[in-house]
Amino acid sequence: MNARLIGNGWTRDAEGSRTIRSLTACMLGESTANKKAACLIANTIEDNLIRRHWPHGAIYGGEAELIKCFGVGRTIVREAVRILDMRGSARMRPGPHGGLRVLVPEREPCAATVASYIHLKATEAIAVHEAQTLLDRTCARLLSREGKNYGSAKPDLQQIFSIAFSLFGSILADLSDLQSRRASPHLAKGYHSRAEQIARSVLTTHRREDWLSGIRIGSASQLCERYHADRSIVRQAIRVLESGELAVAECGRGRGLRSQTPGPATVSRLVSCYFAAHGFAPADAMMLFRALAEEATASVVHCAEPAHIDRFARSLDTLRAADSATAADALRAVESCQFAALNNPLIDFFLLCTRVYSTYFVGDVSHCRAVDAVYLDAARELLIAIEARDEDRALAAERRKQAALALALSHPWNVQAS
């Protein structure tokens, strides 16, 4: 009989609203504001499965157990289950010994969703070949087995290539298809149900510029009439869009569903689910991130302009002056500014999802100002090296920065600076 995994990180803040507190959410800048309970429950279940190394085939809990655990009604729990089913994370199995069964997310739907997100966010054509070149150089760096750069532990290259690089390759291919208009967006891989088809059609009916400006899509009744679907199907479609942070349903006359700009949290969690389900070791993810960051840093040394260097310097000043309440946002801004010269959201995403995945296994910790102190010293040295166009010095500073940050965050795997 399958083990039942009921349990969560579902807590209440000072105002009594339900929130998720984690280092991962802190790094992503993820907020629970305006999120529906069903979306929060789905996220919480996935976060727990990632931390438990994704026990495929196990039963998380039955419907009644989920209702009791999360303190919500049957309708909300069923909406959360539909979101998990749509993502390929879990599916409700009927019967006396049934419950929410943990699945293994597939690569193609995951890659298609990430590619669609990056395509939607980009304001201009993305240089896919530049991201591919960075991956090729990262692959060569890992194959060189430079032990002095990765400490005493050696990466499992087979895992890195078969899990992470294969997913990244699919994302690159899907994004190339989207940009060359070879793919039909409303028939993108991984969208099979009527609700998912409606959600995709709603998304692709409008121009990207209009969608990102926050247009009114329509009320549930209008969507029912437009797509000749009953209210339950349309409601599922709305939840699909909301779970991806693509839209928000507003109450009141003349309001309804409104488009919004998605953040990276949803697709980053999707990748983390895929990594965990396929057995990607957190230590290997951290090593992959460090190799990616070193290659990206080497590129920045050669292409950064004075404006990029100045922006990086100002972000470090902001971090130094930040208090505990604003330090997390300032730290994220520094990481963004460091690689801004590359102007490639694909590279940004590869760095983000590999860095974030490892944080699920660090534990829920408060942001510590001691982290900023060790980070700032190495980051200042990195800034000086970029300004001097000194690649060797920049790479050495990047390695010290990542090693210091890992130690400050008490990673279970400690890396050594060269």
Image: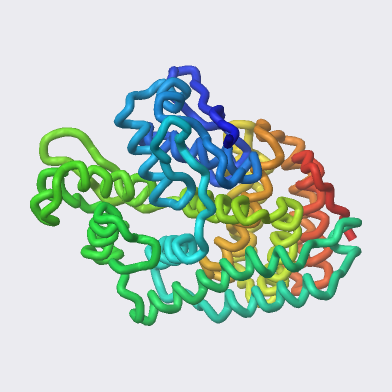
**Residue 279 on image: x %, y %:** 67, 54
Quarter placement of the N terminus? top right
Q: Determine if residue 330 is in view.
A: no
Q: How is the image coloured?
A: rainbow
Percent position of residue 155, x then y? 80, 62
Compared with 175, 116 (above or below) is above
* Label total for image: 0
381, above or below 188, in the image: above
Q: Does residue 396 lie above or below 8 as drawn?
A: below
Q: Tell me where residue 300 sits by quadrant.
A: bottom right
Q: Nearer the viewer, residue 149 or 86?
A: 86
Q: Residue at x 45, y 73 (%)?
A: 174
Residue drawn at x 47%, y 45% is: 90
Q: Is residue 78 above or below residue 183?
A: above
209 vs 340, left or right, is: left
| Residue at the image point whose x is 68% and y is 32% from the top | 365
Residue 56, position in %: x, y? 58, 47
Please state if 304 lies on the left or on the right of 181 as rendered.
right
Instruction: Name the one closer to the observer, 375 or 349.
Output: 349
- Seen from this angle, which residue lies furthest left? 225
Lateral position of residue 343 relative to residue 378, left or right? left
Does the rendering let one see residue 66? yes
Left or right: residue 72 versus residue 347 is left
| Residue depicted at 67% across the width and 78% down the height | 136
The part of the image, by quadrant, that contains residue 150 is bottom right
Of 53 and 383, the residue lying toward us? 53
Q: Quadrant of the C terminus?
A: bottom right
Q: Position of residue 252 (x, y in %)?
A: 16, 33
